[in-house]
Image: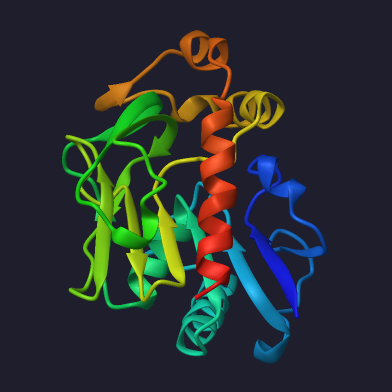
Amino acid sequence: MTTYIIQHVPFESPGILEKIQNYEMIKMFESFQFPKLEEVDLLIILGGPMGVYDDIEWLQEEKQFIKAVIQHNRAVLGICLGAQLIAESIGGKVMPNPKGKEVGWWPIYKRQDVDALNFLPEKLEVLHWHGDTFTLPEEATTFYSTELCKNQAFLYKNNVVGLQFHFETTKGSLKTMVEADASYISGKGMIQSKEAILAKTPPEENADILLQLIQFIKGN
């Protein structure tokens, strides 16, 4: 079985996830084909500027695939848009956050302890690039939050994790995303300047924790 990474736009790349061995990309902005479910060991869903609720034909196909992978108890990790797609797939609802956007480097705080995730610190500084939020079913456990966004990170059935923020960011992928999507750095909410965002070097701790999360969900 193989790790598959779904990429929605060229400027939101796998970043630190390129350290994973033997993965295949599914690029939704090119000609794509989803693998058979029995071929999937781990599915990673990256971010993108589109919304879960947008009327896009390929997005409907992707939703069906994600739901099927989860139903077959495969390991799944979603980042930003990926987390929102997972949330909808397990019975949540995605909508624009009435409190506004979170864009830039802001801290997240542990909401509650999850015994299986005892390697997680109480506080992390992570890159945010989102204006949507979502509800979750009772079976999902939120383990990080912010003032503007309750569900920053959640665990579902010990093998599915959704992250509203970007743990995967490297210095290079950060520069690419900021330059390609600079128009998003505006509006209501907690928004840093382009200069402040680019001045930050992604903490090595974030990459380490992301890889630990992947090992955890693959083992359950």
**Residue at (74%, 54%) from the top-left corner?**
20
In which quadrant will I find the N terminus? Answer: bottom right
**Residue at (78%, 63%) from the top-left corner?**
23
Q: Of residues 176 and 202, which is closer to you in this image? A: 202
Task: Provide residue 157's location: percent of width, then percent of height.
Answer: 36, 76
Task: Provide residue 91's location: percent of width, then percent of height.
Answer: 28, 77
Would you place residue 10 above or below residue 39 in this image? above
Residue 168 in which image quadrant: top right
Would you place residue 178 above or below residue 145 in this image? above
Marks counted in the figure total 0
Task: Provide residue 173's location: percent of width, then percent of height.
Answer: 67, 32
Would you place residue 138 above or below residue 72 in this image? above
User: In the displayed structure, does residue 71 sit left or right of residue 123?
Assistant: right
**Residue at (68%, 41%) from the top-left corner?**
16
Model colouring? rainbow
Q: Of residues 152 and 1, which is closer to you in this image? A: 1
